[in-house]
Amino acid sequence: MAKIGVTGASGFIGGALIPRLAAEGHELILVDDHSGPLRIEYDAWPVRELDFASPEALGLLAGSDLVLHLGAVSGVMACAADPEGSQRVNIAGTRRLVEAMRAHRVPLVFASSFAVVGHPAVLPVTEDTPARPTHEYARQKADGEQIVFGPEEGRTATNVVIRMSNVYGSYTANDRTIGKGNVINLFSRQAAEGRLLVNAPGTQRRNFIHIEDVLAHWLATARFVRAHPSVQTYLFNCAGDEAYSVLEVADKFVRIWRETHPGAADLRVEVVPNPRAAIELIDPEFSVARERTARTLGLPIGHRVDDTIRELLRPPSAG
């Protein structure tokens, strides 16, 4: 088993990943500055409250066999609100981390986002689609990818970029249900009020992947890197095989609500002004291919959007 360092260990993905890594027998070095919206911690796996790019954190992580770099100022709005502050973390901090791990020949896996592809010239998006960022968060993630890959002459270990799609679903940590504020979770709350509010125009299409499938990608990537110690770089598409527009997701909720609440009034769907209209990408044809990732990691997709919506809408009395 390996000694694995994790940055952003108390965040949404880190909080779900830590018990899985521990279950595989790995020794964990966990750091998080606790500046994010979540703080998920376990008594069995303590997290050091440190900036991942601080000298103390870099010294700890340098003793790892592998670093999973999840730490970041994450989200479109957060980076737009404070571009300089988020750049210090996402670009300058990532550069210090990558340089330190290269100096100690420690492989690193970087959490990126499909936001980096912007308006792709060719669809579907594949592992070869270049970054063409259109807003601050995407630019910072694209810069992070370039830092991680770096010039060939500077590489000392295997480095991987994982581009993550829109994550849905939840998990339990310390008897708490942890989920992200995505459209599926949002609609599940709005359904109790009888109406779904769709940000205009509603035709914006996203690829969706369940948190359990995301964890499977990270665990498989960690195993892959440990099994391929040569100095290489890889880019994996952590994406599902379902893509829907926001209106299509709303239609799913309306249909499944009828199935799970027979006799109840139908859900109303209302299109409302989009608070992210100036920066949100609207591409009704957006799609992602992950064949190379699936083949390399031996990883199918195990969860479906309809099943998750049905679970979210099932009345408590239905079990």
Image (tube, rainbow, N blue to C red):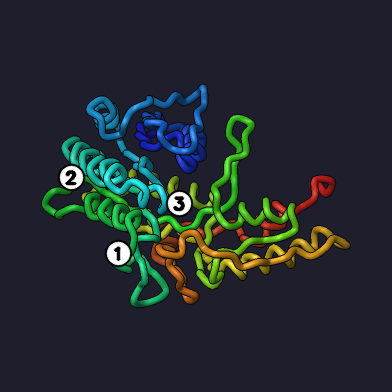
Circle 1 or circle 2, nearest the eye: 1
Q: What residue does disc 1 label?
A: 131
Disc 1 to disc 2, C-alpha distance: 24 Å
Name the kind of residue labelled 1 in the image.
Ala
Answer whether labels 1 and 3 touch (C-beta < 8 Å). Answer: no
**For this rendering, which residue is in front, 219 or 208?**
208
Could you classify mark 1 by the number of other residues whose Cα lies within 10 Å: few (under 14), some (14-19), or many (20 or more)? many
> Which residue is pictured at 29% across the width and 67% down the height?
130
> Which residue is pictured at 54% across the width and 64% down the height?
273
Quarter of the image containing the N terminus? top left
Q: Position of residue 4 (x, y in %)?
A: 36, 34
Which quadrant of the figure has residue 202?
bottom right
Answer whether labels 1 and 2 touch (C-beta < 8 Å). Answer: no
Q: What residue does disc 2 label?
A: 156
Q: Position of residue 164 (x, y in %)?
A: 43, 55
Local SS, label 2: loop
